[in-house]
Image (cartoon, rainbow, N blue to C red):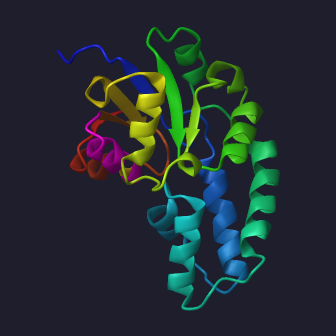
Amino acid sequence: MPPIPGLVIFDCDGVLVDTEPVSNRVLQQRLEAIGLAMPLDAVIRTFVGRSKRDCMAIAAQLLGRPLPPAFGDEWDRAFDAALEEETRPVEGIVDVLRDFPLPYCVASNGEPARMRLALRAAGLLPFVEGRLFTASEVARPKPAPDLFLHAARTMGAAAAESVVVEDTTTGVRAAVAAGMRAYAFAGAAHAEPGALEAEGAIVFS
């Protein structure tokens, strides 16, 4: 029996809020508008779990030229409008957070304002206010361990006593690199249980 964690670190998108279908569709549309047509499953494989900066760098590499100067702002506007309308909590997570018996926080590669927007739209912000961490606070986003180590340190927990709940291989790699137990939620449409397990996660649905 594993020890009781001193801290549980939840990812946001795909674990607390169901934004991945929205974000993948919007990104696919914005990429197509600049001449980079990709099937939705390819968008998911390539970009899910990565920071905006990394996504834009990968997109430019695939496109073979720099992205248009307005790409980032146009993507932001389209994504924010979709989030306001379509964000829902992951099924069951409200009951989990309402009665959660352990210290917990949220750590995401997403941008702070957008994470708060999604959590507010899903009705989850009151559960996590004051314990949100994003890649903007560290030098390197996931899959580097920086964000999870920063969150644990700020929450007063040792890395070895912390566990992470993720839904992407990028996040699982970050958790493993941080020396934390990784649990992978495989209930989202984009989840690949075999790949998550291969990265070192205990997979659940």
- Give the residue at x 79% y 69%: 74
In percent of width and height, residue 44 lies at 50, 62
Above or below, 44 against 105 in this view is below
Magenta stretch containing residue 82, yes or no?
no
Numbered range of the magenta stretch: 170-180
20 displayed left or right of 72: left
In percent of width and height, residue 178 lies at 30, 41
Quadrant into which the N terminus falls: top left
Give the total of numbered labels: 0
Residue 57: quadrant of the picture: bottom right
In percent of width and height, residue 67 lies at 66, 83
28 displayed left or right of 204: right
Q: Is residue 40 visible?
A: no
Residue 184: quadrant of the picture: top left
- Give the residue at x 65% y 61%: 25
Above or below, 73 against 137 in this view is below
Residue 31: quadrant of the picture: bottom right
47 displayed left or right of 125: left
Majority secondary structure in the magenta region: helix
In percent of width and height, residue 98 lies at 59, 12
Magenta stretch containing residue 171, yes or no?
yes
- Give the residue at x 81% y 44%: 85
Above or below, 78 against 205 in this view is below
Q: Is residue 69 visible?
A: yes
Quadrant into which the C terminus falls: top left
